[in-house]
């Protein structure tokens, strides 16, 4: 099969990689450079934590379990680091919510447990946690470096004889037989194909409209910052959630990359934020310094606000669209966690013509045109 994949973020690259492993002839098209969209500013936390309902939580959990094998298949270090996540609360109300959330996830079989203050500081000696009303440890969580994953996927696609066209935009999807797309028209020419994968992130709504499909999204701006390289800060865990310093603040979360830089965000992974100023970056770092004094000499580096893929109902959109039965939609939030399982299952559906039962609730047809 000759398959065109539109979008070279972590989801599109994973799908392209899995298709190439199945001996498909893969052509990847990106309107900029691979990994320059949402993947470039993702916090890249791999988790299945508070993601209701259970079926969606379990979908994320299954993908977490695939990540080790996926990274081994890529044959290079992609910055995959396990160690778990710790968080705690210093006020009674939030502490009770944390305890209840922990019990709820335990009922789903998630490896999470409450820990005491001594265990918390033993795990991370550099912490100055202040008052601890309740603390938890989610032991199987981790993080990865999306740019390294994307580069590795693209390299494998090329090694399998595929093509990657950067700075190339999709203009039209041309149909001539039974509404199936026979070729794609791009800014650099036409490409004949047997199937098309739309993995363009926030652009997927517009791309779907080219064939009359309606795939609505929420606007989901997010902000993270980076620091200059620092000595190794985290000794045991891979992700830390820090309590707010006041009722006006949000939680701060951080992780450290293989080059020593830290990535810092605030609120939950769904929190909307658009302030990418130096002042805001300095404020985020200052809040982290309160808990990690070793960061006092670090410099905050703002990252431009990024717009994240976010289907209207918050859940993945996966599968062929009825308007063109050989066009496969791949749109999701939590793209880093879900990239391995989406790549694996999408390749089965595309190459084998099989409907994977676990994807039934995520089909594009659940949305109705305006």
Image (tube, rainbow, N blue to C red):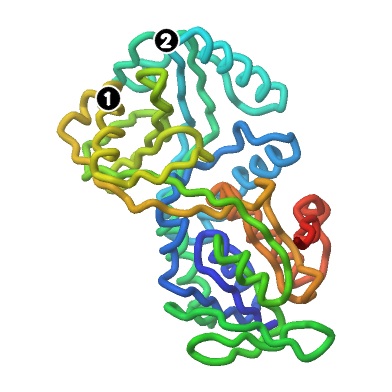
Q: Is residue 264 left or right of residue 29?
A: left
Q: In the orientation shown, which residue stands out farthest toward the left?
A: 297
Q: In the orientation shown, which residue stands out farthest toward the front?
A: 370
Front residue of 65 and 310 = 310
Few, some or many residues within 10 Å of mark 2 (<14, 14–19, 20+) = some
SS under mark 1 = loop
**Residue 151 screen position, x and y as percent:** 43, 65
Quarter that holds the C terminus: bottom right
Q: Is residue 148 left or right of residue 228?
A: right
Vertical arrangement, residue 340 with respect to residue 267, above or below? below
Query: Residue drawn 62% across and 83% down?
Result: 172
Vertical arrangement, residue 343 with respect to residue 133, above or below? below
Quarter that holds the N terminus: bottom right
Q: Is residue 232 left or right of residue 312?
A: left
Query: Residue drawn 66% across and 76% down?
Result: 210
Q: Which residue is mark 1?
A: 292
| Whether residue 187 can be seen here | yes
Q: Name the quadrant containing residue 102.
A: top right
**Residue 140 screen position, x and y as percent:** 55, 33
Vertical arrangement, residue 89 with respect to residue 202, above or below? above
Q: Name the quadrant containing residue 17.
A: bottom right
Front residue of 247 and 162 = 247
Query: Residue drawn 46% across and 8% down?
Result: 133
Q: Which residue is mark 2?
A: 132
**Residue 26 screen position, x and y as percent:** 59, 79
């Amino acid at each position: 099969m000759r398959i065109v994949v539109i979008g070279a973020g972590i989801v599109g690259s994973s799908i392209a990689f899995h298709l190439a492993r199945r001996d498909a002839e893969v052509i990847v098209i990106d309107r900029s450079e691979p990994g320059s969209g949402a993947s470039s500013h993702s916090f890249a936390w791999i988790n299945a934590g508070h993601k209701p309902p259970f079926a969606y939580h379990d979908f994320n959990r299954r993908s977490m379990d695939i990540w080790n094998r996926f990274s081994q298949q890529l044959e290079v270090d992609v910055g995959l680091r396990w160690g778990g996540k710790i968080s705690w609360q210093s006020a009674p109300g939030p502490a009770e919510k944390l305890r209840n959330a922990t019990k709820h996830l335990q009922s789903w079989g998630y490896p999470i447990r409450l820990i005491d203050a001594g265990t918390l500081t033993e795990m991370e000696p550099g912490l100055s946690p202040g008052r601890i009303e309740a603390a938890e440890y989610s032991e199987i969580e981790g993080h990865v470096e999306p740019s390294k994953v994307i580069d590795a996927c693209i390299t494998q696609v090329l090694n399998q004889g595929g093509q990657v066209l950067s700075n190339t935009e999709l203009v039209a999807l041309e149909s001539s037989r039974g509404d199936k797309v026979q070729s794609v028209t791009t800014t650099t020419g036409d490409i004949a194909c047997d199937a098309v994968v739309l993995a363009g992130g926030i652009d997927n709504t517009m791309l779907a409209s080219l064939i009359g499909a309606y795939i609505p999204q929420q606007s989901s701006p997010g902000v993270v910052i980076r620091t200059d390289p620092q000595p190794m800060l985290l000794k045991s865990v891979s992700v830390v959630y820090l309590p707010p310093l006041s009722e006006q603040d949000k939680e701060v979360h951080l992780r450290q990359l293989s080059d020593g830089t830290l990535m810092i965000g605030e609120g939950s992974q769904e929190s909307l934020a658009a302030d990418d100023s130096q002042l805001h970056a300095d404020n985020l770092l200052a809040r982290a310094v309160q808990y990690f004094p070793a960061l006092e000499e670090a410099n905050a580096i703002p990252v431009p606000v990024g717009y994240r893929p976010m289907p209207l109902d918050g859940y993945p959109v996966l599968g062929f669209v009825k308007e063109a039965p050989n066009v496969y939609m791949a749109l999701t939030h939590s793209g880093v966690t879900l990239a391995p399982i989406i790549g694996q299952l999408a390749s089965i559906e595309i190459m084998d013509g099989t409907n994977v039962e676990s994807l039934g609730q995520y089909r594009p047809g659940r949305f109705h045109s305006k």
